């Protein structure tokens, strides 16, 4: 199947596949969902940010002394009914939270798409929401990494002062532990992000990324993968490491793949070839460049899992 045929097949399929991406504020959810959208094809993916389902605007939250992480500050009932409508193919009217003004804009029309990503603080918060989600992901950076990102983003892009962001980080910690962190144990896929051991001194964009997965046997086909070191090592742009195994997390045994460093193009290409063989979707332009980061590869592997699940919902097999 060519990429064009793949996109036509996806856009003709009527059942939306709903992907929930949970994690703290500034934990890297949007970074991953943007990559996944590019890989799957932007035209077949619709994204809803759960910030739109806040119950209170910024001023009201300050008056009530409640953080956006508190369940009472969010409209889970409205979210669940909107997701149920989207699942049954209905167009919804969706609230919009405006981060510039800290208030709500007029609602907008949102039509179901083939793949709908809902990303935010609480997509896996309760049983009703979890039952409406087909694939669940929890993005889980180390605190040091997360706080550095949040500081950079909120000061650089959102106009907050450094002291304000640091105070907010402290203020939110208890609610994060109570209302956000527990969702990890419900996720099918966990993305762990840590400082890299391989990054060159002036590179602050490289991280060690682990893909942890709870996979029921038979859910996803195996990807045959041969690491051809003779082909890969001469192309390496810097130090890298690849490790796999099993870990216990939240009383669950999970498979783990950990990637760090500047992954050579040959490594990514081998993976792509295996995935193309599995899905029969040829030459999706996953990686245009030569040096591949762990974030890129993890996004590719998640996209492949989504494609497999999407295919299993589509009557016409690919
Ligand atoms: N995998 C990554 N590699 C490098 N930098 C990253 C990565 N993920 C996130 N970042 C950095 O952290 C910032 C915040 O990430 P992102 O916007 O993806 O978080 P978020 O969870 O969607 O945040 P929010 O829910 O608050 O909007 C990004 O602007 C980027 O600078
Ligand atoms: O946690 C958040 C995003 O996940 C935000 O802090 C929340 O949406 C409120 O936004 P703002 O600070 O712009 O009022």
Image: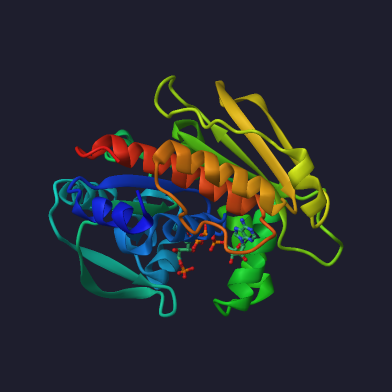
- Return the x and y of residue 125 as percentages of the image width and height: 38, 41
- Relative height, residue 16 to residue 257 (above, below): below
**Residue sitting nearer the eye, 150 or 192:** 192
> Residue at the spot x=40%, y=40% of the render?
279
- Relative height, residue 103 to residue 122 (above, below): below
> Residue at the spot x=25%, y=51% of the render?
9
- Return the x and y of residue 314 as percentages of the image width and height: 23, 40
Toward which corner of the image does residue 135 lie, by quadrant? top left
> Residue at the spot x=55%, y=30% of the render?
224
Relative placement, left or right, of 155 versus 23 is right
Is residue 139 among what the camera can see?
no
Relative placement, left or right, of 49 versus 185 is left
Is residue 211 among what the camera can see?
yes
> Residue at the spot x=23%, y=56% of the render?
11
Tell me the quarter of the image containing the C terminus: top left
**Residue sitting nearer the eye, 283 or 303:** 283
Q: Colour scheme of this structure image?
A: rainbow
Relative placement, left or right, of 152 versus 66 is right
Toward which corner of the image does residue 262 lie, by quadrant? bottom right
- Relative height, residue 252 to residue 138 (above, below): above
Relative placement, left or right, of 297 versus 66 is right
- Return the x and y of residue 251 as percentages of the image width and height: 56, 21
Total residue callouts: 0
- Return the x and y of residue 285 as percentages of the image width and height: 49, 59
């Amino acid at each position: 199947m060519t990429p064009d045929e793949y996109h036509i097949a996806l856009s003709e399929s009527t059942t939306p596949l709903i992907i929930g991406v949970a994690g703290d504020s500034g934990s890297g959810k949007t970074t991953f969902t943007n990559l996944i959208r590019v890989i799957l094809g932007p035209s077949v993916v619709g994204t809803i940010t759960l910030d739109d389902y806040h119950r209170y605007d910024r001023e009201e939250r300050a008056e009530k002394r409640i953080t956006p992480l508190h369940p009472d500050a969010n409209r889970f009932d409205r979210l669940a009914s909107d997701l149920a409508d989207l699942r049954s193919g209905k167009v919804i009217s969706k609230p919009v939270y405006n981060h510039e003004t800290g208030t709500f804009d007029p609602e907008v029309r949102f039509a179901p798409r083939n793949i709908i990503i809902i990303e935010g603080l609480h997509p896996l918060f309760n049983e009703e929401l979890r039952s409406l989600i087909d694939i669940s992901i929890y993005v889980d950076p180390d605190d040091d990494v997360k706080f550095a990102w949040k500081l950079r983003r909120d000061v650089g892009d959102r106009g907050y002062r450094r002291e304000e962001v640091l105070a907010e980080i402290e203020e939110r910690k208890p609610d994060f532990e109570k209302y956000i962190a527990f969702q990890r144990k419900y996720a099918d896929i966990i993305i762990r992000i840590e400082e890299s051991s391989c990054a060159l001194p002036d590179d602050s964009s490289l991280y060690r990324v682990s893909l942890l997965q709870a996979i029921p046997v038979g859910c996803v086909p195996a990807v045959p993968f041969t690491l051809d070191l003779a082909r890969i090592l001469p192309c390496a742009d810097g130090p890298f490491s690849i490790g796999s195994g099993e870990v216990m997390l939240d009383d669950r045994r999970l498979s783990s793949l950990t990637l760090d460093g500047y992954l050579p193009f040959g490594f990514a290409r081998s993976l792509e070839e295996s995935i193309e063989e599995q899905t029969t979707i040829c030459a999706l332009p996953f990686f245009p460049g030569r040096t591949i980061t762990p974030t890129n590869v993890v996004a590719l592997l998640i996209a492949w899992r989504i494609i497999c699940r999407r295919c299993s919902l589509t009557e016409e097999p690919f």
